[in-house]
């Protein structure tokens, strides 16, 4: 545990709330303390209200904010006196509690206060920090957890048995604080949940958190439970792309929607998936209950999706009967898969969700192994996990965004994606929720975007082995392929047939036709298993219906590609794969339209460049974005019953009409 407090940095944060912002960010930087919206912090500040009266406010982390990037606006100001009185109620339902938290805020635009707000309020300290520290959880999640905590901290912390977060926990803490809090205490350990620290200043409270967690780590170290090694797997089993694609198909069915499957290729994940004791280690439950909404209670071992789903249904039925209010079952698909051959896969509705599951499970593995080294990992009973999984307030976190974008959970591969129409397609598909695999011979494609739903791969589309590798990458990274945009192409300099060299002819054919043929052929077995049916968009050209003089190789290649697409539409229709072609014309913001090419083409029509650009019926300029947006729509529900079609996107062309 490293104390990251820095005098110079801290000096930039003036005032109580800003200091709160600073040390919250310090906590957020350490992923062994908090991850993905976990943990929360607060500060109590006296302020004057609009009537000139002094009022004590609790500034507590708002939901939806990550500690690492929190700002002052991420803290919700709530009237402290009211919160303290609420803690004295015998009972308060979740919706009523949330209503109280919201209506007692003094800023209408502040985020909804954390559900742990009342707990923060009853702790009589100016600053309160709360994390779900890996080390502390590893220790509490053992048979003698409470005893070990006493051994480590003596009488410097208050120990709180597990109670579901929310009002009941706050009420219990209020009671324990009143009865047992002493001057010696600098924190509070919540068994199977996490740890609190408190202090008079932001620095003191943060420093105590680091100190307390540091002692937990030290305890693990001295008991040889810190650097835990796993047995080396005997041999490396290569991942089978087809198995992953089939698995995604099955999991998407179980989930009722297309899912992203991300294969974890790091040594730790692979070793854990093939651990001789993986069944016993992984089947006990999550490290802390709030992970359940991301990871489900247990991972799926092996590839029996029906078996997993049935078990999940049983778990739901048993625990639903024990609940006061009837719940609606969530999907029964796993979020973590551990398989000896495929290794570890993490699953989500989006690539971002799958990455969150990966982060959480990565820490879960550490916690399980360390607790095991201490004598045995022990998670909470099923019912406690169920209560959090089906807690309205947790469900609300997942529902947050409303209706998901149309391609959520789907994957598109786009060729020639570094510039022009291909680059515009990347944006159009990302905007509709798809994960994008972008291919280009230009190395810039690899670093075009830095986000979990983007994977840029340098690839020469005329090299079949490179295409094969790119598809494997797509499957490892996201689990499959639903859509394909055949966009990569070359547009050579104008040249009459009599002067056209054989090599040039074949070069154009190679990129514009052969590469399309290869990719279609290689992608077919994957597209066939796309949960909503495969879709292909071919970027053709106006030159197909209306060729131009001096463009023999280009026009012939695009016509051949077009015909290939039509035959594919016939052959693959029964397997729900739709293939449609767009015929753009005069899209000038693409890589192939260098000023020289533009000028030569214009001259061959006897026009100026300006005239040539506006040469269409509607007198409009067609941009890459226009083409990309239409291409994306052609993969959507509007075109669900269209295949083998050719659609011009050219502003209207007299020779085509
Ligand atoms: Zn918590």
Image (spheres, helix red, strand yellow):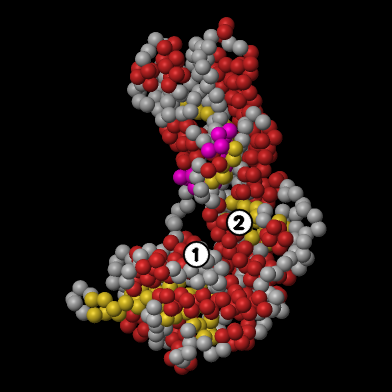
Q: CA distance from mark 1 to mark 2?
A: 25 Å
Instruction: Name which residue lies at 66% across and 72% down.
Output: 226
Vertical relation: 2 (above or below) 516: below
Question: Which image quarter: residue 353?
Answer: bottom right
Q: Quick check: is 609 in the magenta stretch?
A: no
The C terminus - image quarter:
top left
Q: Quadrant of residue 203?
A: bottom left
- Label 1 element class: helix
Residue 272 badge: none
Using residue 8 as the reference point, say whether residue 458 is left or right of it: right
Residue 420 in view of the camera: yes
Magenta-span inclusion, residue 440: yes
**Residue in the picture at 67% in, 53% down:** 265
Crowding at dot 2, Cα within 10 Å, few <14 / some 14-19 / many 20+, comes out as: many
- In the rendering, at what x and y percent does residue 121 appear? 39, 80
Magenta segment range? Answer: 429-444
Tell me the number on the disc at residue 347.
2
Report which residue position mark 1 lands on.
Answer: 29
- Looking at the image, which is closer to me, 9 or 431? 9
Q: Find residue 510 and report its horizontal and vertical position in percent.
A: 63, 23
């Amino acid at each position: 545990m490293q104390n990251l407090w820095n005098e110079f940095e801290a000096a930039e944060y003036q005032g109580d709330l800003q200091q709160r912002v600073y040390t919250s960010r310090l906590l957020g930087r350490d992923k062994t303390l908090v991850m993905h919206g976990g943990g929360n912090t607060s500060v109590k500040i006296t302020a004057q209200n609009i009537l000139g009266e002094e009022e004590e406010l609790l500034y507590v982390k708002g939901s939806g904010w990550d500690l690492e990037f929190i700002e002052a606006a991420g803290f919700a100001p709530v009237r402290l006196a009211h919160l303290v009185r609420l803690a004295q109620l015998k009972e308060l339902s979740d919706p009523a509690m949330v209503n109280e938290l919201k209506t007692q805020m003094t800023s209408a635009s502040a985020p909804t206060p954390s559900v742990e707000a009342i707990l923060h309020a009853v702790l009589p300290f100016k600053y309160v920090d709360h994390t779900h520290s890996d080390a502390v959880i590893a220790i509490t999640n053992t048979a003698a957890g409470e005893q070990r905590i006493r051994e480590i901290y003596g009488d410097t912390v208050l120990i709180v048995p597990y109670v579901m977060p929310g009002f009941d926990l706050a009420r219990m803490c209020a009671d324990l604080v009143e009865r047992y809090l002493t001057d010696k205490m600098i924190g509070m350990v919540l068994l199977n949940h996490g740890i609190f620290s408190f202090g008079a200043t932001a620095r003191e409270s943060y420093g105590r958190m680091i100190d307390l967690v540091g002692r937990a780590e030290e305890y693990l170290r001295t008991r040889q439970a810190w650097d835990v090694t796993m047995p080396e797997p005997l041999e490396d089993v290569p991942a089978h792309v087809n198995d992953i694609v089939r698995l995604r198909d099955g999991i998407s069915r179980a989930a009722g929607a297309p899912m992203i499957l991300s294969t974890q290729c790091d040594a730790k994940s692979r070793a854990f998936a093939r651990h001789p004791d993986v069944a016993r280690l992984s089947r006990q439950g999550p490290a802390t209950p709030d992970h359940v909404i991301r990871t489900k209670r247990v991972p799926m071992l092996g590839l029996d999706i029906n078996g997993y789903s049935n078990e999940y249904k049983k778990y739901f039925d048993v625990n639903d009967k024990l609940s006061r209010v009837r719940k609606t079952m969530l999907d029964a698909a796993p979020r973590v898969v551990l398989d000896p051959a495929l290794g570890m896969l993490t699953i989500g509705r989006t690539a971002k969700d799958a990455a969150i599951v990966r982060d959480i499970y990565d820490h879960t593995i550490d916690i399980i192994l360390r607790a095991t080294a201490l004598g045995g990992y022990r998670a909470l009973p099923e019912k406690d996990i169920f209560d959090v999984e089906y807690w309205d307030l947790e469900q609300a976190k997942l529902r947050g965004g409303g209706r998901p974008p149309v391609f959520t959970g789907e994957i598109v591969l786009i060729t020639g994606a570094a510039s022009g129409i291909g680059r515009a397609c990347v944006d159009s598909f990302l905007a509709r929720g798809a994960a994008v695999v972008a291919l280009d011979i230009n190395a810039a494609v690899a670093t075009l975007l830095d986000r979990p739903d983007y994977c840029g791969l340098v690839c020469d589309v005329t090299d079949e082995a490179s295409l094969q590798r790119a598809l494997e990458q797509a499957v490892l990274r996201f689990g499959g392929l639903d859509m394909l945009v055949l966009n990569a192409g070359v547009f050579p300099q104008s040249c009459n047939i009599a002067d056209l060299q054989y090599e040039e002819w074949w070069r154009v054919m190679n990129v514009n036709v052969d590469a399309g043929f290869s990719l279609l052929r290689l992608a077919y077995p994957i597209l066939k298993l796309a949960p909503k049916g495969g879709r292909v968009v071919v970027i053709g050209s106006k030159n197909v219906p209306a060729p131009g003089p001096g463009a023999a190789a280009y026009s012939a290649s695009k016509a051949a590609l077009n015909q290939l697409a039509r035959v594919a539409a016939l052959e693959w229709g029964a397997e729900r794969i739709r293939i449609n072609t767009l015929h753009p014309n005069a899209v000038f913001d693409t890589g192939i339209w260098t000023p020289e090419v533009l000028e030569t083409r214009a001259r061959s029509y006897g026009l100026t460049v300006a005239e040539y650009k506006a040469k269409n019926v509607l007198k409009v300029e067609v941009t890459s974005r226009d083409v990309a947006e239409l291409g994306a729509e052609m993969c959507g529900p509007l075109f669900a019953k269209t295949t083998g079609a050719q659609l011009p996107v050219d502003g209207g062309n007299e020779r085509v009409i």
